[in-house]
Image: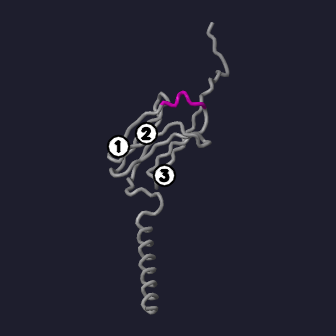
Amino acid sequence: MKTLIKPLLVAFSLILISLTVSLAAGNPGRRPARIATFQSGVYITAEGKVKVALDKQTGGAVTLRLMTAAGQELFVQQVGKNQTMTRMQLDVSNLPDGAYQLVVSNGVDTTTHELTLATKQPVASPRRVVLN
């Protein structure tokens, strides 16, 4: 009887170890099941607004974030997994001058676009011409 229990115990432990290893390799961590590849472009209009163009594959979500240099989120938009393209316009005229980041991410790949807002100071002309 003792000779039968030890081989069964070893066999059971090997089965348990192999089962846990195979389950752990299936979905490691919090990685999404399907990831959508994307391409993004950022453009500035003449009015000072930011236009964002995003083309992506179906099957996974992509998140757009406008953040300050300190990491504070000002705008968050998630593009759904069934959408293939998004065009949006962000009005940044009310934001103070400074450095900002537009972060586009699908959970694995992240693209960061740097934005710098600066107000033009009026320039006084150095000389005046007068006709008499």
Q: Considering only vertical position in the picture, is 106 above or below 115?
A: below
Q: Is residue 74 left or right of residue 86?
A: right
| Residue 41 percent location from the top left of the image | 43, 43
Instruction: Tell me what residue is drawn at x 44 percent, y 68 percent.
Output: 24
Q: Quadrant of the N terminus?
A: bottom left
Instruction: Tell me what residue is drawn at x 63 percent, y 6 percent.
Output: 132
Disc 2 target residue: 52
Could you tell me how many numbered marks the image carries?
3
Q: Earlier in the sequence, mark 2 or mark 1?
A: 2
Secondary structure mainly formed by the magenta segment: loop
Disc 1 target residue: 85
Check if mark 2's residue and mark 3's residue have beta carbons within 8 Å.
Answer: no
Q: Which residues are magenta?
A: 91-96
Q: Secondary structure at mark 1?
A: strand
Q: Residue furthest top?
A: 132
Viewer-proximal residue among 114 and 64:
64
| Residue 83 percent location from the top left of the image | 33, 44
| Residue 65 percent location from the top left of the image | 49, 42
Q: Quadrant of residue 34?
A: bottom left
User: Amino acid type of disc 2?
Assistant: Val
Q: Earlier in the sequence, mark 1 or mark 3?
A: 1
User: Amino acid type of disc 1?
Assistant: Met
Disc 3 target residue: 110
Q: Considering only vertical position in the picture, is 63 above or below 8?
A: above
Tag 2: Cα neighbours inside 10 Å, few (<14), some, or many (≥20)? some
Q: Is residue 82 magenta?
A: no
Q: Earlier in the sequence, mark 2 or mark 3?
A: 2
Instruction: Tell me what residue is drawn at x 33 percent, y 50 percent.
Output: 58
Check if mark 2's residue and mark 1's residue have beta carbons within 8 Å.
Answer: no
Q: Quadrant of residue 72?
A: top right
Q: Considering only vertical position in the picture, is 81 above or below 129?
A: below
Q: Residue furthest right?
A: 126
